[in-house]
Structure formats: C-alpha cells, structure tokens
Amino acid sequence: MTGRDLTTTLTRVASDLLDAVSGADRVDVTAPLHDPSWSRWSYLPGDRPGLSLEHADPELLGHVSALIAASHSQRGADLVAGAIAVERERRRSITGQAPSGDRYWLRVHGTPGSDTAWAWRLNGHHVGVHVSVRGDDFTATPHFIGSEPARLTDGEAAGTRLLGREEDLARELVAQLRPAQREVALSSETAPADILSAMDPVVDPSVLPTGIRRAELDTDQRRTFDALAGCYLDRLPTAYAEACWAEAMDVAADDMAFAWAGGTAVGQGHYYCLTTPVFLLEYDNTQDGANHAHSVLRHLRDDFGGDALRRHHRDSHGSHGSTAS
C-alpha cells in the first residue's frame, strides 16, 4: 500500500467513525489538532481525555477496530487487541468477574478529509496509539504495548505471551554475543523499573544506555539485531516501516546499538533498548516478579506527527499573516 493509499483509506475509515457518533459523544471524541492533550499520554491505569469506549455499542466498536486495522499491520492490530484482552483478564482476576467493557479512550484531533493535517489516538492501560496524517504523510509513534501479566497463567489463554517475540529475539541476540561483546552490551546488572523514555512528549535518547554498536556485530548477530528492530517496526503499515528502516540504515547503519540490563535467565527482571539515529525501541519486564512487560517504539523526529504537524502549524499561521512591505 502506498502512502496515498494508506492515508486515503485511513481518512475514509476515520470519517465513517465520526459519522457514527453524535451528541455528547461527538464532543468527547473530537478536539482541535493543537489541543495539548494530543501529546499528553500515559500507559498507566486511569481516565484519559476523549470518548470512553467502556460502554460503546457494537457499531462504534466496529468502527474503532477498523481504524486500528487501517493504521497497523495485521500483527500490530493483533497486538493492540491482545493488550486489551490481557487487560480484561487482569481485571477479571482482581474482581472475579468479567468487566462490562474496556477502559480505553478514543480521540480524533482535527478533521479527517480536510486539506489540513489531522490525527487520532487510542489510550488506556498498556495501549498508546498515536497516528497523524497530512496529505501522503503518515506517522504512528509513540506506539506502546504492554502486558500484565507478561505470561498468562490460567484460563483458556494460559501460557500466552503477548510480547513473547519481542523478548525472545532480544534473548537470542544476547545469547549470540561473545564474552567481550557482552561486557559492552550489558549496561547494568540491575534492570530499570520501567522504560527510560517514560511518557515524555519529546523523547530523549541520551537517557538510554549505549550498549554495543551494530558495526561490532558479526553477520548472524546483525541478522538478529535487524529482526528485533523489525519486530517493532512491523507493527505498523509496511510502507511506513520500510521507510523508517531505510532511513536509519542510510543515516548511520553502523551506529545503531543494542543494550541489555538485568538478569539474563528467564524469570529475572530485564530491560533492553535498541537505538538508531531515527527511532528507538525499549522493552522492560521487571514488575510483578518480572511478569509485567512494557514495550515502546519512539521516533526521534516524528513522534506525535513531528515534522508533518510542524509544517502544518507553520503553513496555517503563515496563511493568516501579512507580507511586510
């Protein structure tokens, strides 16, 4: 799917969703593009700005599912649905009853189909989806998926690991490292309590450990490194994912890096990050006896629309200005 195909489809799906919402719900689900809530996000429990989906009817939930699908690859859409399903199971395990609905909040910023930029977000416990559109431009970060528990221990889904691929590829890379390489890659014997980029609206790569550079890896190790990066990028539409990877490879392929912190045995708290000059990713599994995982993909330039929305704001302000004589 090309950039134009992607954004055209996404705009149509978002417009269909808004057409299905009216009254007070319409007020809750919409906001201006410049509203500060666009970049104020959280992956913790609690209320969010926007339209609560907890008691939404099946028609609206169908539109939301279509919007998620249009903004992701199949795997990415499955991860979002999976995080919501795991959260449902977590709540059931606490109360003893299946929850009546899912506590997530949807908001559309700006107007889909207009000549200007627009965006949408879905936020709630362990889900952070942020998509922006301007013409053919598409961005989809920050993108957060968490799972509590990381491994389901009972019920029909017992043994399921929503983020199992993210953990296993990183473990495979650590196992491939020679002793001298491990000394470089392992930044600390103790993993941080959470991802280090946290919920900052502007990501700061300097807070992450450096680790081992891709240039210091052999062919097999690089293959695993690349697969780990792809595991996160592949959550998103193919054209977007390929463009992110191609840019990172073109800018500084050798300067990409991987770092691990914490224990390397299964069941021990652990953390890793993979950094590039274009994007970074983090994974942390330390809470609740190392059975509570967080993962995030951040773009150093294009989080929350980045350059595309900056151009939009610049053009919008410029159109209302006057030319000096």
Image (tube, grey):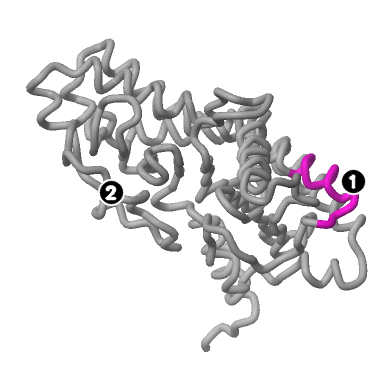
The picture places residue 72, in percent across and down from the top left corner, at: 64, 36
The picture places residue 228, in percent across and down from the top left corner, at: 39, 26
Residue displayed at 26% across by 48% down: 208
Element class at badge 2: loop
The residue positioned farthest toward the bottom in the image shown: 325
The amino acid on which the numbered mark 1 sits, given as a three-letter code, is Pro
The residue positioned farthest toward the front in the image shown: 96
On residue 192, the disc is 2
Quarter of the image with the N terminus in it: top right
Q: Residue 178 is drawn in which quadrant? A: top left
Rounded to the nearest whole Å, what is the CA distance between mark 2 and mark 1? 40 Å
Q: Would residue 62 appear left or right of 80 to someone viewing this image?
A: right
- Where are the magenta residues, as a range? 55-67
Q: Residue 235 is drawn in which quadrant? A: top right
Residue displayed at 58% across by 35% down: 236
From the image, tell me which residue sits under label 1: 58
The amino acid on which the numbered mark 2 sits, given as a three-letter code, is Pro
The picture places residue 260, in percent across and down from the top left corner, at: 25, 35
Dominant SS of magenta comes to helix
The picture places residue 89, in percent across and down from the top left corner, at: 65, 40
Q: Would residue 211 appear left or right of 90 to someone viewing this image?
A: left
So how many labels did they put on this image?
2
Relative depth, front residue between 118 and 284: 284
On residue 267, the disc is none
